[in-house]
Image: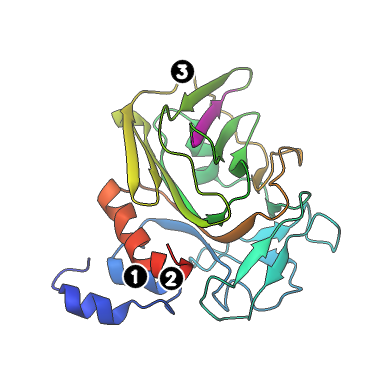
Amino acid sequence: MLPGMGRPLLDRTISNSSNLRDVLEALGLNGSLKILLDAGDGGSVASASQAKWNDVSGNAYDFFRGADGSSSSDDPTFNGVIGRQSAGEFWSCDGGDFFTYDSSPEAFMSAWHKDGALFTVCGWAYLVGSTMLVFTRSPGISLNLGTNIPAYTFNMTNDTVTQSFGSGTFPGASVNRWDFWGLAVNESASSFLFYLNGDALTFSTSYSSPSVNAAGSFRIGANNSGGNLAPAGTRFGSLAAFSSALSQAQLGQIFSATRGKYGV
């Protein structure tokens, strides 16, 4: 919450028609924002046929539809009305679709699998099965959100070995319903947090022999070679990435401010 902003004012500032940019600004959480993709934001999706899902964080870290932005069968499909903020605005996948970062991974992306990693990724997705939401490999990280227990599997891969961080008995995501997911990592403090629809799991651990090399391809809905694809029917509503480890309370603020739009 912004300093001096009372709850009633904040409620008037944020509504179900607010885009995620406005929500993060009203909550005072945009200071470390690196990537912001929002299917309902007219700046992020100005045309159903555009080649990229545009980043509206101000950093222009855009993602190609498919492998390279050319029109092909691996392109997610836009659904809804351009610029309308509702649960009906999303990118859908047919079992062979994904997004690819439009350049070589940025330094902050590569830092996610290195010693001292400090970041948060979160967003809204509609699951019909296990979905690889964020994936950078050889080396890199992967985050798998699924409908079975454990709901989360987070992997850190150095050049040869994969280190897995399972979520134990953390409840699975909902099937055929929107879910707000989040991962916050402060590796220097051995602090890891999984967040899902108001529930959180925190645990203390560290990376083992992390790589110092740049990450592999950065993709949403697939791994760096286009495998582990999001199942047909998967929907992506938004994805945000931060260069800080948001707290459970901060992720809860985003969830509370956006859940009404998705009927959760």
Q: Is residue 43 left or right of residue 263?
A: right
Q: How many marks can you see? A: 3
The magenta span reads 151-158
The label shown at residue 225 is none
Which one is in front, 232 or 119?
Answer: 232
Whether tag 2 and tag 3 are in contact, CB under 8 A, the answer is no
The mark that comes first in sequence, 2 or 3, is 2
Look at 47% across and 66% down and name the residue there: 262
> Which residue type does callout 3 highlight?
Ser
> Which residue type does callout 1 highlight?
Glu
Look at 69% across and 39% down and name the residue there: 223
> Which residue type does callout 2 highlight?
Arg
Which one is in front, 141 or 209?
Answer: 141
Confirm whether residue 264 shows in the render: yes
| Image quadrant containing the N terminus | bottom left
Q: Quadrant of residue 14?
A: bottom left
Which one is in front, 212 or 120?
Answer: 120
Look at 51% across and 49% down and name the residue there: 174
**Image: 89 above or below 236:** below
The label shown at residue 208 is 3
Q: Quadrant of residue 195?
A: top left
Residues packed near mark 3 inside 10 Å, few (<14), some (14 to 19) or many (20 plus): some
Residues packed near mark 2 inside 10 Å, few (<14), some (14 to 19) or many (20 plus): some
Look at 61% across and 67% down and name the residue there: 90
Residue 63 magenta-highlighted: no
The label shown at residue 25 is 1
Q: Which residue is mark 2?
A: 21
Q: Residue furthest front?
A: 175
For the residues labelled 2 and 1, the Cα–Cα distance comes to 6 Å
Q: Is residue 6 left or right of residue 151?
A: left
Residue 153 magenta-highlighted: yes
Whether tag 2 and tag 1 are in contact, CB under 8 A, the answer is yes
